[in-house]
Image (cartoon, coloured by chain):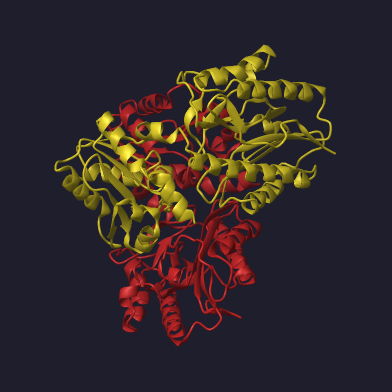
Chain colours: A yellow, B red
Amino acid sequence: MTSNLATNLTAGRLDRARTVLAAQGVDALLLTPGAELRYLTGYDALPLERLTCLVLPVTGDAHLVVPKLERPRADESPAAGLGIAIVDWPETADPNALVASLLNSALGAAPSRIAVADRMWAIHSLALGAALAPATLTPAGPVLRELRMRKDPAELAALRDAAAAIDRVHDRVPQGLQAGRSESEVGRDIAEAIIAEGHVAVNFVIVAGGPNGASPHHDTGERVLQQGDLVVVDIGGTNAAGYCSDSTRTYALGDPGAEALAMYAVLQRAQEASCNSVRPGVTAEGIDAAARDVIAAAGYGDFFVHRTGHGIGLDEHEEPYIVSGNADPVDAGMTFSIEPGIYLPGRFGARIEDIVAVTGDGVERLNRSTRDLVVLD
Amino acid sequence: MTSNLATNLTAGRLDRARTVLAAQGVDALLLTPGAELRYLTGYDALPLERLTCLVLPVTGDAHLVVPKLERPRADESPAAGLGIAIVDWPETADPNALVASLLNSALGAAPSRIAVADRMWAIHSLALGAALAPATLTPAGPVLRELRMRKDPAELAALRDAAAAIDRVHDRVPQGLQAGRSESEVGRDIAEAIIAEGHVAVNFVIVAGGPNGASPHHDTGERVLQQGDLVVVDIGGTNAAGYCSDSTRTYALGDPGAEALAMYAVLQRAQEASCNSVRPGVTAEGIDAAARDVIAAAGYGDFFVHRTGHGIGLDEHEEPYIVSGNADPVDAGMTFSIEPGIYLPGRFGARIEDIVAVTGDGVERLNRSTRDLVVLD
């Protein structure tokens, strides 16, 4: 089932990638396991010290180089149905020389510019760079961004599925969020719920109570939650199709006080304004400004210390980035987070995050759980 | 609590790393989030597109470069107590130039040879390489292997904790392993149990039944388990201290037949022989041969298609590798898997995997759940 879906998803993508390679003057794409490999071939392989690598030259045959022990897994994968020849290497061979030889044969000459997976491990990029010297390596992101940023209907369905799963986790958060429990205890319950509600992996669980909420990427720890705390809960996972969820809600353990309530009201207006600003043609930095302006006008401008959002898909963070300086317009099919936050150092913080999809004429919010402050008794 | 443990763990490691840098003629170490950063500083940071990087020159001040929004997390981390200056960069700045400038200042000259984290993402290694040109980048693994391979008592305790947690998961596997359920359904239960029994992350869940068991890295899928199947269950996670578990057991759904039982008996003897061969001074390839010889003598040599094991610690796969061609002797404190397998293509397979630690005069098996074939009614 997963394999058929993936084959549908990937039909035509290899050809489009080659068109972009040619247009950008890149001789080949080398992709180790990760989102780009899965996007182009449907192959969901483990990132390991043993080299697995898609070798996609701008012309000539494509190959998937795999360790011998992963040959059966590769043969069963959608990659095998896409006209990609699978080549395995035994445990004590040099796979980097194999990649170089396949590339030289396909191109009929040594390549000079090669794009590698954005997250390729250095042990692989350095070894491949040495085997292919003097070719220049460049990240694959700019090559594949035009393909990957605009999600097709099957990808949008997979992202809706992931969003609904994380919404169900947020619906369960109040059950375990109590004064007297540590962030870690609450975080473990949430991690279990992330799997139980329809993900195959837990990507991150941030539970940040009281002053810890003022640290946007707080490391969920041993602090015990207190009555009156604001608690930022930012969670995400990956579903069976490979797509990511990511949603933040802020909870209060009893009455958090008038100042926190006033701050939260500003944040909620900012997040709403930013979501409402989304439609095809608006710039990424315009969507950032829509949130930032509301927060700055209320006097909290210095306390919103990060960009408003990031793209999401097979990667939890990908293009487009919703940040000052990104003047690219967004377009139908793009999916990204809108997650302004306000952080008062040493005191408390709050963040609201939805994943949204740009539609033909506006925006669809994929997360639906309440954005009101959830005040628990 | 975690922080104090980490500070104890890391005291002195930075100095030892500098000693190795000097001995190997490496000017600096650049570590993005991952096992090496956690090993040297205790800082458990998220690998992200925003650069976080330890800048450790062979002489001069060490710095931890972090995104501004992660400043509070870095300040709270054990790194802050180790004399490492923390420097943050705002959302729209260039952190690679910052790293180059810090290195040049510390060394009083441009570096010529720099070791980078083995798993540093290509977007970072390529950008850092450009900012530091014409310096040569090399993987940090060979620099840090002599430190990381020999675990200290706190690390051994953390690995015992992880092993006991995954043993408890194997103890629960029979509850959900039934003919009529799919590998995916069983795998989801196991993923939940991995978190519930004391891990903070699920690293992998392989449930490979019947013919799928002949694929060592099978992708747990939609096949429904059948009465008579052998089922290979290879699972692992990471505990709160950052250390990994990894254990494989093979189960049978009812009587798997005489041939499978005979094959399993050979495998069990091979795994036992390999474990029993471990003591300080024995070579890694000798430990591999101890398993391989038993399997080959029984006529299954062509069906054991992978190395016998891999080191384990903060990384799920690290040195030493227990493989033909690795003539390095093992030494007290080293920890690795012993996981021979026999795979009959299209029919069935089996694997038995324990994590072991080399002691002063022999071996300690960290996994204790039964290695007998678990036959379920």
Outermost front residue: A360
Q: Is residue A327 visible?
A: yes
Task: Say above or below: A201 vs A256.
Answer: below
Name the residue located 29 percent from the left edge and 65 percent from the top edge. Answer: B327
Instruction: Decide which of A110, B101 is in the foreground and name it.
Output: A110
Q: Is residue B116 left or right of residue B173?
A: left
Name the residue located 59 percent from the left edge and 44 percent from the top edge. Answer: A161
Q: Is residue A256 left or right of residue B209?
A: right
Image coords of residue B178 (percent x, y): 60, 72
Name the residue located 73 percent from the left edge and 33 percent from the top edge. Answer: A210
Q: Is residue A29 left or right of residue A322?
A: left
Q: Quadrant of the C terminus of chain A?
A: top right
Image coords of residue B360 (percent x, y): 46, 68
Instruction: Decide which of B150, A242 is in the foreground and name it.
Output: A242
Instruction: Decide which of A202, A346 is in the foreground and name it.
Output: A202
Image coords of residue A343 (percent x, y): 66, 25
Instruction: Decide which of B36, A16 is in the foreground and name it.
Output: A16
Image coords of residue A189 (percent x, y): 69, 50
Name the residue located 50 percent from the left edge and 31 percent from the top edge. Answer: A334
Q: Is residue B43 visible?
A: no
Q: Quadrant of residue A112?
A: top left
Outermost left residue: A108
